[in-house]
Image (tube, helix red, strand yellow):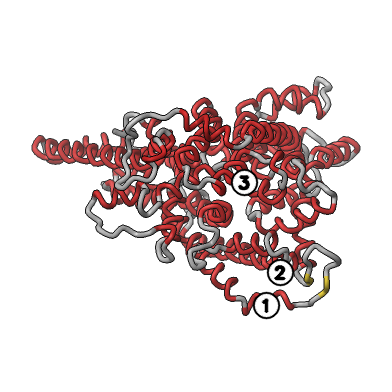
Amino acid sequence: MSTSDQTVNAVAQIDTGARSKRRKRNSELLQRIFIYGLLLAGSITFILPFLWMLSTSLKPSQEVFTYPPNLIPSRIVWQNYIDGWTILPFNTFLKNSLIVTIANVVGNLLSCSVVAFGFARLRARGREFLFVLVLATLMIPREVTIVPTFLLFSKTGLVNTLWPLILPAWFGYPFFIFLLRQFFMSIPRDLDEAARMDGASIWQIFTRIILPLSRPALATVAIFAFIGNWNNLLDPLIYIRSQELYTLALGLNLFRGQNFTAYNQLMAVSILTIMPVLVVFFVAQKLFVQGVALTGMGGR
Amino acid sequence: MLQQEANTAQIGQVARVRPRFGPQARHEERMFYLFISPWLIGFILFWAGPIIASFVLSFTNWNLLGDPQWVGFANYTKMSTDKFFAIALVNTLYYGIGSVILGVAVAFMLALLLNQKVYGQAMFRTVFYLPSVVSGIAVALLWLNIFNPDFGLLNQLLRNLGVENPPGWLVSPQWAMPALIIMSVWGAGGSMVIYLAGLQSIPEHLYEAAAIDGAGRWTKFWVITVPMMSPVIFFNLITGFIGSLQAFVQILVMTDGGPANATLVYGLYLYRNAFRLFQMGYASALSWALFIVIITITVIQFALAKRWVYYEGEVPGRTS
């Protein structure tokens, strides 16, 4: 336990001696059991939906709607994954999702790092005010701008192309600007100053000093951008009409609309679509936690 | 907070090295605007422009065909008598308050448990965090499956526990909203990580000092943990509530506002007006009303926060 509790223990020892010490140890043991009990119960609750998803995805069709439902399928049907994936052109949807997501990750990395550097390192009149605007836009929900943004893309003839899903990322995203700016601020300024003395330009300070030192923060942004776009349903729903431009999220929605009783295949394809997110999460969990610690906000 | 102060101090220091006026400072200023230009353009195109445009459009009728027609305040008067607007507002508050309060409670409790220096802390953290990362339609479909009244996992568990008539969840007008709130709590792990980071940054010496003064576990919790965490919780309340407004996409997939409009939330109603009924004028008025509501809520939350949020450094006569 923590040092504070040891201190309490020490005080208790001097005060009352052995019997109370034993009582203390017993109550502490009970407390530990209670804590682990709660944690285990919580873990099971949080993990159970995933197990249910997996179990449904492997069930033979006749077992999806049995009453009472069973958690363990009588036999494992891997075929659900193949059938589900091929019933609609999911390969095309995957390709579109990849295009959109990669373009978003690259766009966000480039635009947000440049902007964040400006806010973190360059002095100018109006800087504080503009940064307040960045933070203010963090607070504005999508619904507020959804209609005019649609009109903008509609007037420029970009509805039913992938552009409306890609372009905004190239103009900076407030949350990522905030995250990177916080990180850049934590890099000692002495490094910039030394480079400046050696005649480095502002651009060189940015590309040769700040960016190489910011790999963890840039990786965090890349991951948040990846997951945010991979999960995005709203924008594709608004902007995409033709099936050959569908992303995975839209494809899954279409699949569900057409075969809403084929829950085993639906869950199989759902698992396939969240697989990249799971992989990224397990590989880079540390970066998520760093991003959270840096901004005090979860990724959205 | 401290970080902020340190940064300001740093800026002050550097200012002495670099000139504030003259050609070099002007060059730096030009570079600043050059560097932030992507955001500046984006801000005008995707934030300021749309907000102003929707303000103008909110005084028109426009179905995308032909030109917008000026109708004055008609959209706003329509709003005041629109039954669905009122329903959507109430539902949004129900969902927002329910999911935020329950989410904060669960996340904070999990963080407290994990902060007890337990074995396998990293594993538990992963388990609780994971669901919040996987969102979107796959999760919506999963929970549709879980909430199925006859064949779903949840009601099966309830029946095993002896509940004879478990709720219909998403097909029941009373239970549909609680179901969505339960689903949102599954994603509470994101804020748990924030709380855990906050808890771990509370200096140990505060607890030690309290222990010397004879404070018990409970006192230490209320006198140290809660005040130290209050800014984090407060910040999460605001961002959580605003975040809850975005949940309408999942609700769209899961219930489309039903049954009997029980889950018709604001975003969904706005989406319906804009992209199904093509009433761009009315949808814009709805956007603007929401914008004003958001600003009001944020201001109120900030005003209330003064009463209970403790910021380090504000305390008079602090000794350390």
- What whole-number distance in Å separates the C-alpha atoms at marks 1 and 2? 9 Å
Q: Chain ID for label 2?
A: B
Distance between the Cα atoms at labels 2 and 3?
24 Å
Q: Which mark is residue A235?
A: none
Q: Chain of mark 1?
A: B
What residue occupies the far top of the structure in this picture?
A198
Report x, y in % for residue A249.
60, 42
Q: Which mark is residue A233?
A: 3
Crowding at mark 2 (Cα within 10 Å: few <14, some 14-19, many 20+): many
Residue B216 or residue A10, whichever sits in front: B216
**SS assignment at label 2:** helix
Query: Which quadrant of the view contains residue A17?
Result: top left
Label 3: element kind: loop
Q: Amino acid under label 2?
A: Tyr
On-image quarter of the N terminus of chain A = top left
Cα distance between the residues tagged 3 and 1 = 30 Å
Q: Residue furthest left?
A: A19
Residue position marked by numbered label 1 in the rendering:
B78
Q: Which residue is mark 2?
A: B282
Residue A4 in the image: state x and y as whole percent: 31, 37
Residue B258, position in %: x, y?
51, 63
Q: Could one spot residue B295 in this view of the protein?
A: yes
For the residue labelled by badge 1, is the local secondary structure a helix, a strand or a loop?
A: helix
Q: Quadrant of residue B268?
A: bottom right
* Type of the residue with mark 3: Leu
The percent position of residue A164, horizontal first and vertical second, equals: 75, 45
Front residue of A41/B196: it is A41
